[in-house]
Image (cartoon, rainbow, N blue to C red):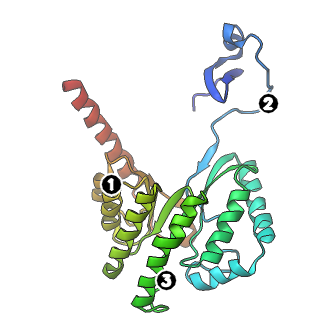
């Protein structure tokens, strides 16, 4: 792990300038007049960044499999109650070393529930962690709405809700709960185009069987990350390598639901090979 016994950091304006043994750092001219913060008996290390969480939705006792019922539970809860419950989770995460957490919504086309979650997240932005909110776009569930209703819901999200969230700076990312249903791909394409046009960096949930189709969509729309990928193959990893898109894998999700694991080693290997090729190309130019 590269431990430095009796080590010290020199930090200026939030930026680490020097790392080494205490004796060496103390003898630097730049440390004159520095404020000393003792971390004796502790370990100084980078904080954990949790880049994919469903911190507030669905609420305990509800299931994401029934989005409409879960959204009703959010609407019926007071903002204060949601904040208290979320604050307790954030404090537990901070005790275990997390410094930054991304939190998704995902209530479907339900403005009341979505904005309630995002308002609470905005109020919690730096207490005690840096909270990064993401708007998770989720289509109405099949069988619960006719296709015409889906069309109207999508149009409302794209023309009203998404621009409103952007104006009020409620969300940092625009996320997408991707599905393999061919009839729904056009809606996803429209959503990603609209989000990018507004200036949102886009993310994609890819926990369905056809990972290649989700990856292709992520590449076409220059997504910043694609998450889950439990059903990805080494060939899918090769497709993603070199694109600059982050693959966010969730082994605890697989462990919790007894599902399959993403091919993490393949992603690491393909990314390393892609970087080696890029460096080799630069050397021979």
Residue 38: x percent and y percent? 80, 25
Whether residue 252 is visible, yes or no, is no
Whether residue 169 is visible, yes or no, is yes
Q: CA distance from mark 1 to mark 2?
A: 42 Å
Numbered circles on residues, count: 3
Q: Is residue 221 left or right of residue 105?
A: left
Determine which of the numbered discs, if any, sits on residue 140 in the image: 3
Q: Which quadrant of the rendered structure holds the C terminus?
A: top left
| Residue position for label 1 | 237
Q: Earlier in the sequence, mark 2 or mark 3?
A: 2
Q: Nearer the viewer, residue 60 or 121?
A: 121
Q: Is residue 106 left or right of residue 75?
A: left
Residue 244: x percent and y percent? 37, 46
Q: Is residue 226 above or below residue 284?
A: below
Q: Secondary structure at mark 2?
A: loop
Q: Quadrant of residue 88?
A: bottom right
| Residue position for label 2 | 41
- Of circles 3 and 1, the one toward us is 3
Q: Residue at x 35, y 58 (%)?
A: 221
């Amino acid at each position: 792990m590269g431990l430095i016994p009796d080590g010290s950091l020199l930090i200026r304006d939030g930026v680490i300038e020097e790392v080494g043994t205490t004796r060496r750092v103390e003898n630097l001219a730049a440390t004159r007049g520095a404020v000393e913060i003792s971390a004796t008996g502790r370990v100084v290390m980078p904080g954990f960044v949790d880049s994919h969480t469903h911190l507030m939705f669905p609420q305990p006792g509800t299931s994401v499999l029934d989005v409409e019922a879960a959204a009703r539970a959010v609407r019926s809860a007071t903002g204060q109650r949601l904040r208290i419950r979320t604050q307790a989770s954030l404090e537990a995460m901070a005790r275990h070393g997390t410094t930054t957490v991304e939190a998704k919504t995902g209530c479907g086309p339900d403005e009341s529930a979505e904005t309630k979650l995002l308002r609470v997240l905005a109020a919690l932005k730096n207490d005690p962690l840096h909270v990064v909110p993401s708007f998770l776009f989720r289509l109405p569930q099949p069988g619960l709405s006719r296709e015409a209703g889906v069309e109207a819901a999508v149009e409302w999200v794209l023309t009203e809700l998404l621009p409103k969230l952007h104006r009020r700076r409620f969300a940092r990312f625009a996320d997408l709960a991707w599905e393999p249903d061919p009839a729904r791909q056009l809606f996803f394409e429209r959503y990603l185009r609209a989000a990018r046009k507004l200036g949102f960096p886009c993310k994609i949930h890819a926990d369905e069987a056809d990972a290649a189709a989700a990856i292709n969509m992520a590449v076409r729309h220059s997504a910043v990350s694609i998450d889950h990928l439990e059903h990805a193959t080494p060939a899918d990893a090769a497709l993603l390598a070199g694109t600059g898109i982050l693959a966010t894998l969730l082994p605890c999700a697989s462990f919790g639901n007894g599902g399959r694991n993403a091919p993490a080693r393949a992603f690491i290997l393909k990314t390393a090979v892609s970087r080696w090729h890029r460096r080799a190309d630069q050397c021979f130019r």
